Image (spheres, helix red, strand yellow):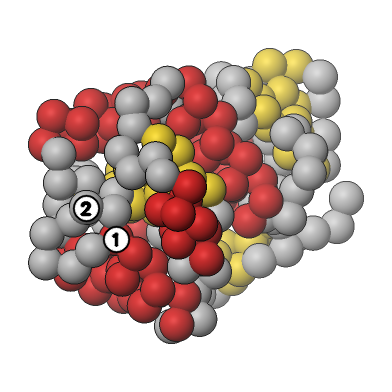
Amino acid sequence: MRVLLIEDDVALGEGLHQALGREGYTVDWLKDGSSALHALLSETFDLAVLDLGLPRMGGLEVLRRLRQSGSNLPVLILTARDATDDRIAGLDAGADDYLIKPFDLAELKARLRALLRRSAGRARVLIEHRGISLDPSTQQVTYQGEAVVLTPKEYQLLYELLSPPGRVMTRERLMQLLYGWNEEAQSNTLEVHIHNLRKKFASDLIRTVRGVGYLVEERP
């Protein structure tokens, strides 16, 4: 779950970067609109948290250009602008949600989980597939009714492959989603995580698509 945080307030940005990281998100953080738009158009993210009052390019312009590019990336506006006209402008520009500063961190996390569910086409909180039950709100995972202990990266990888199953995920995209810009990973790190997930669930859960990436079959 890779998030692009676009916020020029350093104290708030550092706090959100740490808090969302503890929730298992891979968080990349930019402080101006121009850099953010370039990243949004050139890289892969699961969602974006966007301030409006940004240097170099305002948040609304970033959002308009993102939507003009055809992207349907979930975007939550996080701003101190609380006037009704500002909310309407943000939503009309293509925002999926709008949260006013100051805000409750627990509410922000809940809204992000809801955006991820909607973007994956899921109404239910739980992700269930082939005996696996994954709860994004608690990050608890069970297999055939028994709790399974996963490392943070194993959890992120399983979540991405099951959201939803049936998609081939390229190696490059998975590495971006798991590590972003801020973490270095060895060349075989992804393969090690895949191996561990196969051991903890089923050897045939994750199929290697040679030369492309990995796939969890859509079949039950």
Quadrant of the rendered image containing residue 17: top left
In this view, 16 is above or below 66: above
In this view, 46 is above or below 1: below
Q: Relative to residue 126, is residue 94 drawn left or right?
A: left
Q: Relative to residue 82, is residue 107 drawn left or right?
A: right
Residue at 28% across, 31% down: 16
Please state which of residues 16 and 183 is positioned toward the viewer in this rendering: 16
Q: Which mark is residue 153?
A: none
Three-letter code for the amino acid on which mark 2 is drawn? Gly
Q: Which residue is mark 2?
A: 53
Residue at 52% across, 39% down: 112
> What is the x, y in percent for residue 187?
27, 56
Q: Residue furthest bottom?
A: 69
Please state which of residues 49 and 86 is positioned toward the viewer in this rendering: 86
Residue at 48% across, 47% down: 84
Whether pointer 2 and pointer 1 mark residues with C-beta atoms closer than 8 Å, the reply is yes
> What is the x, y in percent for residue 45?
41, 59
Q: Which residue is mark 1?
A: 59
* Mark 1: secondary structure: helix
Quadrant of the rendered image containing residue 65: bottom left
Q: Residues within 10 Å of mark 2 (few under 14, many from 20)?
A: some
Three-letter code for the amino acid on which mark 1 is drawn? Gly
Please state which of residues 17 and 141 is positioned toward the viewer in this rendering: 17
> What is the x, y in percent for residue 68?
45, 82
Please state which of residues 158 and 5 is positioned toward the viewer in this rendering: 5
